Image (cartoon, rainbow, N blue to C red):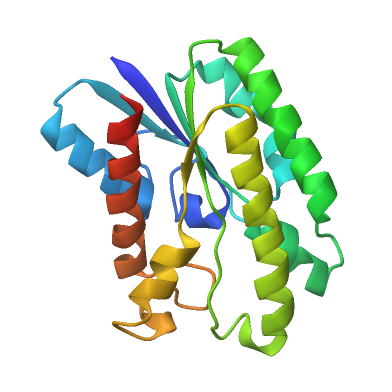
Amino acid sequence: MKTILFQGDSITDVGRSRSNDNERGLGYPHLVSARLGLDNPEEYNFINRGISGNRIVDVYARIKCDITNLQPDFLSILIGINDVWHELGCRNGVPAEKFEKIYSMLIEEIKDACPDIKIMLMEPFVLPGPATVEHWEYFESETKLRAEAVKRIAEKYDLAFLPLQNLLDEACEKAPAVYWLADGVHPTAFGHELIAREWCKKFEEMQ
């Protein structure tokens, strides 16, 4: 049985259990595991170790206990929005250059510890919403910088890259932004399903 590990912040966490890896929360990891588990019975073990509020430095700090010790066959990472957001309130964000540096270090160490691992990097995203509209120009420009960094890292290390910003922008042509991201950052059920479907498509390409 192969292990798929989901890593990230609250967008990945979504209420997942801290004591039972079989309880993967209510977000896209849950939807992905339901779909893949149905189509491929007992082929995959799904683990969600996303933690609400995490920035890239936080994921890097727990690389051993929550990534390499688990020896996953597949790793999915979605991180970046808190590196932007946390600068507004507590001035504890992670600048774009440092974000890229730490993210690159994370990938290098994971690949060294798990040489056969397959990794998918998910693009951080944002939409106008209750949590973002007041500082929209900042959110839009800074999130874009993190998204560009993630794409460069994926290209540098020959990893799968899952673009999501354009997907959500296009979805907003069908329904308002808050239909997909409740506050401009956190997906609704519909937003999670949108992400899960694209995740599964990218995963198929990785086989």
Q: Position of residue 91 (x, y in %)?
A: 87, 66
In the rendered view, tell whether residue 7 sits above or below residue 2.
below
**In this orientation, which residue lies closer to the viewer: 116 or 185?**
116
Q: Which residue is depicted at the point 41% across and 69% down?
A: 168
Q: Position of residue 189 (x, y in %)?
A: 31, 67
Report the label total. 0
The answer to whether 84 appears left or right of 200 in the picture is right
Q: Which residue is depicted at the point 27% across and 24% down?
A: 44
Q: Position of residue 118 (x, y in %)?
A: 46, 23
Q: Which residue is depicted at the point 36% across and 80% down?
A: 179
The answer to whether 93 appears left or right of 119 in the picture is right
**In this orientation, which residue lies closer to the viewer: 134 or 137?**
137
**In this orientation, which residue lies closer to the viewer: 14 or 203?**
203
Considering the image in quadrants, where does the C terminus appear? Answer: top left
Residue 131 falls in image quadrant: bottom right
Considering the image in quadrants, where does the N terminus appear? Answer: top left
In the rendered view, tell whether residue 161 sits above or below residue 3.
below
Q: Which residue is depicted at the point 43% across and 47% down?
A: 16
Q: Position of residue 6 (x, y in %)?
A: 46, 38
Q: Is residue 54 visible?
A: no
Q: Is residue 157 visible?
A: yes
The answer to whether 62 appears left or right of 117 in the picture is right
**In this orientation, which residue lies closer to the viewer: 120 or 11?**
120
